[in-house]
């Protein structure tokens, strides 16, 4: 594997950061999210996010308002149209699993790619972690792209793929959504086509931008060829060399760049409770 070395150590930041793997993940030390951030801290966090792709924070016993306030430093906030939210706080997605609702985010994905303008990033806070298990894996899409065989790169360069919220459709129907409501959702969120290889709007780097949770097919390609190519890309993305792994504790936070990472929440805590709040920052149209 050809993994681009990290830059973090070469820049003086206003906080400490400990890398989690060669190219992805860094734990931030020396920031208290109960306090408003200075302009310098926000700028440094933006820089560190672009460099490390996912930032981790520990021991952040913050309120919902402080969680929202932190996220607003990075842009406007999204409201998820299908997922449950904290009462009175539509921007706070409540992700709760227990013995009656087993973990469901255990497929590689980048958030809401079924939107025309998928999110810039997500800020996930752990309210209650299982005693063991329930870690989240993150995968670096630049590294995955840069390590594609040339023959595959040539096949996917310039191609577009369709993204769909089918998994939510199944859940909505199971919850009793009417066909009229389903038609309204389909109209509000028509399946977008995004480039298979996305150029990050801030770094200019290229990364793989298809995922097994929401991508259905590559446009203008025979069905069998599209299936085979997507399947190759999904296996490739799952290579551990591109990953880091985060072990949650109560009041841990992960802030990932949705434009160049995928994540996978490991569902190995059957019967135990895992409760998270996610606040998501609006993004732009992938190019
Ligand atoms: C998500 O997919 O946004 C949730 C990830 C997690 O719960 O670790």
Image (cartoon, helix red, strand yellow):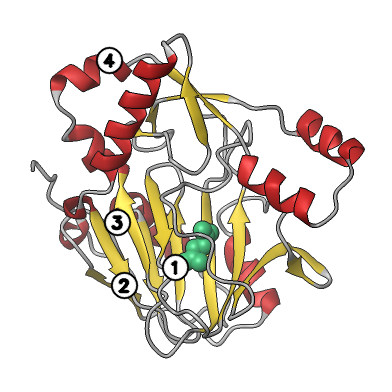
- Marks 2 and 1 sit apart, C-alpha to C-alpha, by 9 Å
- Marks 3 and 2 sit apart, C-alpha to C-alpha, by 9 Å
Q: Earlier in the sequence, mark 3 or mark 2?
A: 2
Q: Position of residue 262 (x, y in %)?
A: 39, 49
For discs 4 and 1, the disc positioned in front in the rendered view: 4
Q: Earlier in the sequence, mark 4 or mark 2?
A: 2
Q: Secondary structure at mark 1?
A: strand
CB under 8 Å between discs 4 and 3: no
Circle 4 sits on which residue? Answer: 155
Mark 2 lies within 8 Å of ligand 1 (Cβ measured): no
- Marks 4 and 1 sit apart, C-alpha to C-alpha, by 34 Å
CB under 8 Å between discs 4 and 2: no
Q: Earlier in the sequence, mark 4 or mark 3?
A: 3
Q: Is residue 152 left or right of residue 68?
A: left
Q: Position of residue 223 (x, y in %)?
A: 44, 16
Circle 1 sits on which residue? Answer: 254
Circle 3 sits on which residue? Answer: 52
Classify 10 Å Cα crowding around label 2: few (below 14), some (14-19), many (20 and above): some
Q: Nearer the viewer, residue 80 or 34?
A: 80
Q: Which mark is residue 27?
A: 2
Q: Position of residue 141 (x, y in %)?
A: 31, 42
Q: Nearer the viewer, residue 85 or 38?
A: 85
């Amino acid at each position: 594997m050809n993994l681009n070395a990290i830059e973090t150590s070469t820049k003086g930041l206003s906080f400490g950061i400990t890398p989690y793997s060669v190219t992805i993940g860094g734990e931030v030390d020396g920031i208290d999210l109960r306090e408003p951030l200075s302009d310098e801290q926000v700028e440094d966090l933006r820089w560190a996010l672009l460099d490390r792709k996912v930032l981790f924070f520990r021991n952040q016993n913050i309120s919902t308002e402080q969680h929202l306030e932190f996220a607003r430093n990075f842009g406007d906030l999204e409201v998820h149209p299908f997922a449950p939210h904290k009462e009175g706080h539509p921007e706070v997605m409540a992700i709760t699993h227990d013995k009656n609702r087993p973990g469901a985010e255990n497929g590689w994905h980048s958030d809401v790619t079924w939107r025309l303008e998928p999110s810039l990033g997500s800020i996930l806070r752990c309210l209650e972690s299982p005693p063991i298990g329930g870690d989240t894996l993150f995968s670096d899409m630049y590294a995955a792209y840069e390590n594609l065989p040339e023959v595959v790169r040539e096949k996917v360069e310039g191609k577009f793929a369709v993204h769909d919220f089918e998994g939510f459709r199944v859940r909505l129907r199971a919850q009793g959504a009417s066909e009229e409501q389903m038609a309204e959702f389909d109209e509000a969120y028509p399946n977008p086509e995004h480039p298979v290889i996305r150029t990050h709007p801030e770094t200019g780097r290229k990364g793989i931008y298809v995922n097994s949770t929401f991508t259905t097919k590559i446009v203008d390609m025979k069905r069998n060829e599209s299936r085979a190519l997507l399947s190759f890309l999904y296996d490739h993305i799952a290579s551990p060399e591109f990953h880091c792994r985060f072990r949650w504790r109560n009041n841990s936070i992960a802030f990932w760049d949705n434009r160049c990472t995928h994540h996978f929440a490991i569902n190995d805590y059957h019967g135990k409770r895992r409760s998270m709040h996610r606040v998501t920052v609006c993004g732009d149209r992938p190019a």
